[in-house]
Amino acid sequence: MTFTTEDILGALGTVHDPDLKKDLVTLNMVRDVAVSAHKVSFTVVLTTPACPLKEIIKQDCLKAVEKVVGKDVDIEIFMTSSVTTSRSQAPLLPGVKNIIAVASGKGGVGKSTVTSNLAVALAQTGARVGLIDADIYGPSVPVMFHCEAEQPEVKVINGKNVIIPLEQYGVKLMSIGFLAPPDSAVVWRGPMASAALKQFISDADWGELDYLLIDMPPGTSDIHLTLVQTVPVTGVVIVTTPQKVALADAIKGLAMFKQPQINVPVLGIIENMAYFTPEELPDNKYFIFGKDGGKSLSEKFDVPLLGQIPIVQSIRESGDSGRPVVLKEGPIAAAFMTLAESVARQVAIRNATFAQTKKVELTV
């Protein structure tokens, strides 16, 4: 039996990406097809190394090709990834494929903890990740990454002073906490805080990144407007807890990004502190802040629920010790890895569905 490269591409043209709703050939996800009498090989390029559907797509490809060549032919499938982007030709941070703002309506919902673990989880999948701590008045990243005493290096590149972000656990980091003494308060008016964020973006050498996470301050402030006016933001993730007061503020944060003049896609909602599970009773769930508040919010605004993270002692201990809990074995680490897959998945869908990101131009 003889078959050609066109036969293989025809077979793979019947395999669809479950998220993007198109076949792999149309999406240009099939590369390097090689055919011989007894062997077929090809590469499938996924939209993210954190793709949760990797094995499903691989098995679908195997079945489709077997229908054409039979089961006696050796089929070799190489799975790789190239993170998609909607930021092509962006003047600032041209090497950064996706900028993701992590926001919350109010403080105290664990946004920085979630952001830190999400960044490390994405890096563990093989993605290139950066994190900007944009909470100028209450920076948390230095503590959570165990680098409070460190300072970023400054180099002169093309006659300009450039900040070199610190790197910890595979994540590039920038925070005002690296530049100010840890026991001093940052007493700045809004324009100064906004200028600091701009400097973290434009005066730092971020290089090539798949995802740059921005840990936003609580609420809706100058910092939020500065971000969307400075760079095209791929999307925003909203962190909330289940109780009513947090949800009310989360709605305001979500509404800000959905305003027509801002119009940043909402990738989804993360429900933090979704339930309490005692270490000695791992199968028990106590909904001390209410149940499914984030889920109800996601349904109300028709945006995905990206994950529900429990409140457990190990998350707090890991944050205090400067070693994010996702680096450890166990169900909590697995929950954050699943969250990373969900976020990466929504970024890929967003890039395939919505128009290219543009910088926000506000007239007021």
Image (tube, helix red, strand yellow):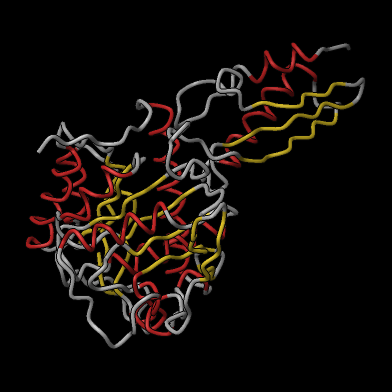
**Nearer to us in this view, 354 or 192:** 192
Q: Is residue 232 left or right of residue 208?
A: left
Q: Is residue 361 left or right of residue 232?
A: left
**Nearer to us in this view, 124 or 282:** 124
Residue 58, placed above or below residue 224: above
Q: Quadrant of the C terminus?
A: top left
Q: Quadrant of the N terminus?
A: top right
- Quadrant for residue 80, please give it: top right
Q: Is residue 111 left or right of residue 3?
A: left
Instruction: Please tell me which residue is depicted at 80% across the width and 26% down the height of the picture.
Output: 71
Q: Give x and y (percent) for residue 66.
A: 74, 24
Residue 202, placed above or below residue 302: below
Instruction: Please tell me which residue is depicted at 87% across the width and 27% down the height of the picture.
Output: 39
Number of numbered discs on residues: 0
Q: Give x and y (percent) for residue 271.
A: 26, 58
Q: Residue furthest front?
A: 159
- Quadrant for residue 54, please give it: top right
Instruction: Please tell me which residue is depicted at 35% across the width and 80% down the height of the picture.
Output: 281
- Quadrant for residue 299, please give it: top left
Q: Give x and y (percent) for residue 15.
A: 58, 23
**Nearer to us in this view, 270 or 75:** 270
Instruction: Please tell me which residue is depicted at 54% across the width and 40% down the height of the picture.
Output: 83
Q: Give x and y (percent) for residue 261.
A: 16, 33
